[in-house]
Image (tube, helix red, strand yellow):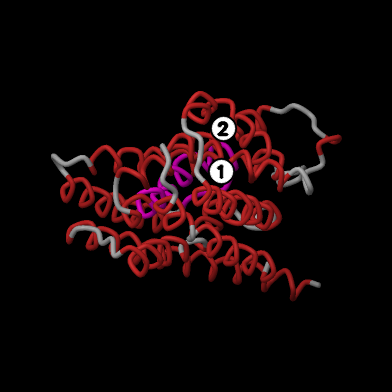
């Protein structure tokens, strides 16, 4: 369990570079998503066991949710602040709590629902802050990327007894197929290729390699909560580099989201420890 937690923390640090690198790549957002996925395919092909591929609906829906998540997140990051994009994506625990019980048989407690209420309240503040501006569209992309992230996590978790990395690999291929028209007419320059390479190899490729190992041992909701280090660092890198800051209500909403999801994370880990202690005593 501890190894998996460390892998998730490393994953979230790699993920947190996404906001900055996406902002620095001067390219159409859909094309960015496509080229980033294309590069990650070459990296992931070194580790995924393609010969062992067997079709399953988990892989199919997992690939669709992964492609949707990565495309929507890039679009959100390009059309609103990096802080808004990442924090709205991390409303995914709401949807994991709603659908996780049905698809994973991992129950959600009353305390989790209280947390979800406050997360939703924080999300509303983002829309109040950006209402009537172009950022509102970016915030909508952010919310949708959170829905896609939840299903991506759920379907990777459902593959815990197989190879969750295959969901990412085939999802990356689907991403390239969807975005290929934009990639053809938006060819990156030399400087953009550097950012895209970092995004494809480290921010997506290596991060999901680590995540696919960790998700086998940690429930879907808990894995998302542990990765909260990503929305903490993501806007920091952007602020320190290009000075981008979200609005006041967005900051308040983000703080509300982080506080209550962090409290839920602490509670989840404590419950897991209480469950494991009797098992150790029995042994």
- Foreground residue among 165 and 283: 165
- On screen, residue 72 versus residue 154, left or right, reads left
Identify the element where label 1 is drawn. helix
Q: Which residues are magenta?
A: 86-108
Q: Residue furthest right?
A: 51
| Cα–Cα span, label 1 and label 2 | 9 Å
- Numbered badge on residue 175: 2
Majority secondary structure of magenta residues: helix
Query: Taking 282 as reference, is 261 above or below it?
Result: above
Quadrant of residue 137 within the rendered picture: top left
Split into 4 quadrants, where in the image is the C terminus? Answer: bottom right
Q: Position of residue 221 (x, y in %)?
A: 52, 53
245 in relation to 60, above or below:
below
Work out whether residue 138 or residue 39 is closer to the camera in this orientation and state it. Answer: 39
What residue lies at 76% left-to-right and 45% top-to-bottom?
Answer: 161
Extreme-left residue of the structure = 132
Image coordinates for residue 155, horizontal then vertical, percent: 61, 39
199 relative position to 208: left or right: left
User: Which disc is residue 36 wearing?
Assistant: 1
Secondary structure state at the residue bearing disc 2: helix
Residue found 54% across the figure and 27% down from its top: 180
Residue 131 picture location, percent across and down: 15, 43
Q: Is residue 93 magenta?
A: yes
Examine the rendered structure and indicate whether residue 282 appears above or below residue 132. Answer: below
Tell me which label, 1 or 2, sits earlier in the chain: 1
Residue appearing at x 64%, y 45% in the figure: 40
Residue 92 versus residue 96: which sits nearer the camera? 92
Circles 1, 2 touching at the beta carbon (< 8 Å): no
């Amino acid at each position: 369990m501890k190894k998996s937690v460390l892998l998730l923390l490393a994953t979230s640090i790699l993920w947190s570079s996404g906001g900055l690198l996406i902002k620095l790549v001067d390219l159409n957002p859909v094309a960015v998503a496509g080229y980033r996925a294309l590069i990650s395919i070459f990296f992931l092909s070194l580790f995924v066991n393609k010969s062992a591929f067997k079709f399953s609906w988990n892989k199919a829906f997992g690939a669709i949710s992964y492609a949707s998540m990565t495309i929507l997140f890039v679009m959100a990051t390009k059309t609103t602040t990096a802080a808004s994009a990442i924090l709205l994506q991390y409303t995914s625990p709401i949807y994991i709590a709603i659908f996780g019980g049905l698809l994973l048989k991992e129950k959600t407690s009353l305390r989790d629902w209280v947390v979800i209420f406050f997360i939703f309240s924080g999300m509303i503040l983002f829309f109040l802050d950006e209402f009537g501006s172009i950022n509102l569209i970016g915030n909508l992309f952010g919310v949708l990327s959170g829905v896609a992230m939840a299903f991506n996590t759920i379907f990777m978790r459902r593959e815990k007894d197989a190879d969750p990395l295959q969901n990412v690999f085939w999802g990356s291929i689907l991403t390239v197929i969807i975005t290929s028209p934009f990639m053809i007419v938006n060819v990156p320059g030399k400087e953009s290729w550097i950012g895209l390479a970092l995004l494809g190899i480290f921010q997506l490729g290596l991060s999901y390699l680590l995540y696919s190992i960790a998700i086998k041992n940690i429930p879907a909701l808990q894995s998302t909560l542990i990765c909260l280090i990503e929305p903490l660092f993501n806007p920091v890198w952007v602020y320190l580099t290009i000075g981008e800051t979200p609005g006041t209500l967005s900051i308040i909403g983000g703080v509300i989201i982080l506080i209550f999801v962090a409290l839920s994370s602490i509670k989840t880990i404590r419950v897991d420890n209480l469950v494991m202690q009797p098992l150790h005593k029995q042994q």
